[in-house]
Image (cartoon, rainbow, N blue to C red):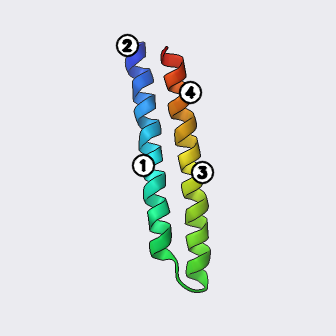
Amino acid sequence: MKLNIQWKKVLYGIALIVIGIILAAFHFIVAGDGIRDFISSIIAVISVLVILVGTYITLSEIKNCK
């Protein structure tokens, strides 16, 4: 059962990475003028943070599975 919980966390990490990539693509769609650039920048920062957290969770759980 412990192995299944660890692999679920790995899948959560991968899901976070995918969500971060989707947010990065959304960042380019939102870009425009004035306030849209500001919102686009916030989305870009959030996407980078989500990708980093997803990578950390995935790698730490893969390391613990061995």
* Residue 28, placed above or below residue 13: below
**Three-letter code for the amino acid on which mark 1 is drawn:** Val
The label on residue 60 is: 4
* Mark nearer the N terminus (4 vs 2): 2
* Mark nearer the N terminus (1 vs 3): 1
Whether the residues at callouts 4 and 3 have beta carbons within 8 Å, the answer is: no
Q: Secondary structure at mark 1?
A: helix
* Residue 17, placed above or below residue 36: above
**Mark in the foreground, 4 or 2:** 4
The label on residue 41 is: none
**Three-letter code for the amino acid on which mark 4 is drawn:** Ser
- Judged left or right of residue 45, residue 4 is left
Residues packed near mark 4 inside 10 Å, few (<14), some (14 to 19) or many (20 plus):
some
**Three-letter code for the amino acid on which mark 3 is drawn:** Leu
Q: CA distance from mark 1 to mark 4?
A: 17 Å
Whether the residues at callouts 2 and 3 have beta carbons within 8 Å, the answer is: no
Residue 39 occupies which quadrant of the picture? Answer: bottom right
Residue 42 occupies which quadrant of the picture? Answer: bottom right
Whether the residues at callouts 1 and 2 have beta carbons within 8 Å, the answer is: no
Q: Which residue is label 1 attached to?
A: 18
Residue 7 occupies which quadrant of the picture? Answer: top left
Q: Position of residue 1 (x, y in %)?
A: 37, 13
Q: Position of residue 13 (x, y in %)?
A: 47, 37
Q: Which residue is label 2 attached to?
A: 1
Q: Which residue is label 3 attached to?
A: 49
Q: CA distance from mark 4 to mark 2?
A: 18 Å
- Judged left or right of residue 49, residue 1 is left
Q: Secondary structure at mark 4?
A: helix
Whether the residues at callouts 4 and 2 have beta carbons within 8 Å, the answer is: no
**Three-letter code for the amino acid on which mark 2 is drawn:** Met
